[in-house]
Amino acid sequence: MTASETSSGAKTEEEIFETVITLLEPFNKKGITITRDTDFSTDLDLDSLAVMDLVAAIEDHFDINIPLNLLPDLERVGQVSAKVQEILKG
Amino acid sequence: MDLLDKFNPLLEAKAQLPFEDGDPFTVCMDEVISQTEAVINGRRTILAGTNNYMGMTLDQDCIAAAHKALDAEGTGTTGSRVLNGTYAGHKELERTLAEFYGTEHAMVFSTGYQANLAMISTLCGGKDYLVIDADSHASIYDGCKMSDATVVRFRHNDPNDLDRRLKRIDNAAGRLVVVEGLYSMLGDKAPLKELVAVAKSHGAAVLVDEAHSLGVYGETGRGVAQEAGIEDDVDFIVGTFSKSVGTIGGYCVSNHPKFDVLRLVARPYLFTASMPPSVVASATTAIRKIATGHDLREQLWAGARRLHEGLSQLGFELGADVSPITAVKIADQATAIRFWSAILNEGVYVNLAFPPATPNGIYLMRCSLSAAHTADQIDTMVERFGKVGRALGVIGDASGKHPSGEAEQKEPGLQAQGVAAATG
């Protein structure tokens, strides 16, 4: 993905959600179906190291920083896609 | 609801750990013999995990200075630096530090932990950005938590990732990049020249924590920034008196023209009692000795090379290149605990380091050396590491053959619960 694509601001939440699912794939060890309500800790069993790697993958893909301060509020996949959209909009 | 019930999962996890031969969280030095030996569990033990890099804890000049101040001024100041807690000794210590670093300003804190808390939480406010290395010490993370700034992490020791992170932040915002000179767990040195160049190319300020590098790196022991020749580009250097300086306390030095305003706003400086006079006196003496302590640095480095080489030759996997911190990697938690107990029973104390204190979920037998360690002590340590390593299958037998690497059954993890061998 190029910078011009990410900065277009045209991404819908649905598109971002689909991308997050793709980025989540390597972390979905149990192969469960991901929905917006999937919880990183209780459903996906991600430990703090896996969360860090996942966040870095999302940040690099969308060319954004997801500040550390926001992480405690991001428990479910849908919250992440919504937050990414918010950050992309500026 | 009992307030401490929330820690039940931690207590349950701890109860299942193989601590039958000793609990690493309750080690007691029953008698201190020297900088490098103590009696633990009735056994004379080589200390290889004390961060006493320059051996200053029992330096005769430091002890004499502390005695003099203790007799003259008493056991404590009973007050904040901004009330009744500033003595002539505190001012002299700050002048000594400023002279040592060649900076305009120096400020001392009651602990190194508080120095990071104070600087990080005060320098960056609500509209600013803290950009920190992901493997930062707990005091840096806690400073971030205390600050109202937005906190962004970059990959450990990765200038390219720092560059990407800074590109994503508005240049108009205040930005402080926080790194350490030498990382305490693995003993890996930061590529400071590259990191600082990236920070400066974006116009960001830089704070370097030299907690484990003071005394050890650089021509006069000022740390990794001095060794890298980039001190002029570092806005704030933070450090501690609890390692090479051999006592307790922390400091920050800087050339920032408005530096002294921090004395009026940094809460971990304001709302705590100042360092006791004897501690101030021994710190002042130790810093002067560190500046000229080339022989101590040489002894320390010679010992570090000897230990690193000895453990490498035995087949242990080590955390980083030669430094006064040598971390032996152990594959799993159960083996790590057994290794730690066994080597303590052999008469060598090292730090058992767990996640989250360690990066990437690894387990370490963390050794830190002192200039006071003799070559014989280091050879004894290597020999005992070899004995325990072979007994537990961490290394191969004398033929150099490695074990099959069979994984032990996974023990309940402590990562999530926050048990860590603190070395700050």
Image: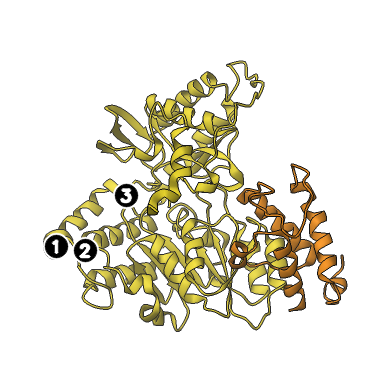
- The colour applied to the residues of chain B in this rendering is yellow
**Could you tell me which chain the residue with mark 1 belongs to?**
B
Q: Residue at x 87, y 68 (%)?
A: A2
Residue closer to the observer: B58 or B389:
B389
Looking at the rendered structure, the secondary structure element under dot 2 is: helix
Cα separation between marks 1 and 2: 7 Å
Question: Within 10 Å of the Cα at label 1, are there few (<14), some (14-19), or many (20+) other Cα atoms?
Answer: few
Across and down, in percent, residue B260 comes to 39, 80
* Residue hosting label 3: B56
With respect to residue B183, does B115 lie above or below? below
Q: Image quadrant of residue B206?
A: bottom right
Question: Within 10 Å of the Cα at label 3, are there few (<14), some (14-19), or many (20+) other Cα atoms?
Answer: many
Marks 2 and 3 share the same chain: yes
At label 2, the amino acid type is Pro
Looking at the rendered structure, the secondary structure element under dot 3 is: helix
* Residue hosting label 2: B277
| Residue contact at pointers 3 and 1, CB within 8 angstroms | no
Across and down, in percent, residue A70 comes to 62, 67
Chain given the colour orange:
A
Q: Earlier in the sequence, mark 3 or mark 1?
A: 3
Q: Which mark is residue B74?
A: 1
Going by the picture, which residue comes out furthest to the left?
Answer: B71
Across and down, in percent, residue B265 comes to 39, 79
At label 1, the amino acid type is Gly
**Could you tell me which chain the residue with mark 3 belongs to?**
B
Q: Earlier in the sequence, mark 2 or mark 3?
A: 3
Looking at the rendered structure, the secondary structure element under dot 1 is: loop
Cα separation between marks 2 and 3: 17 Å
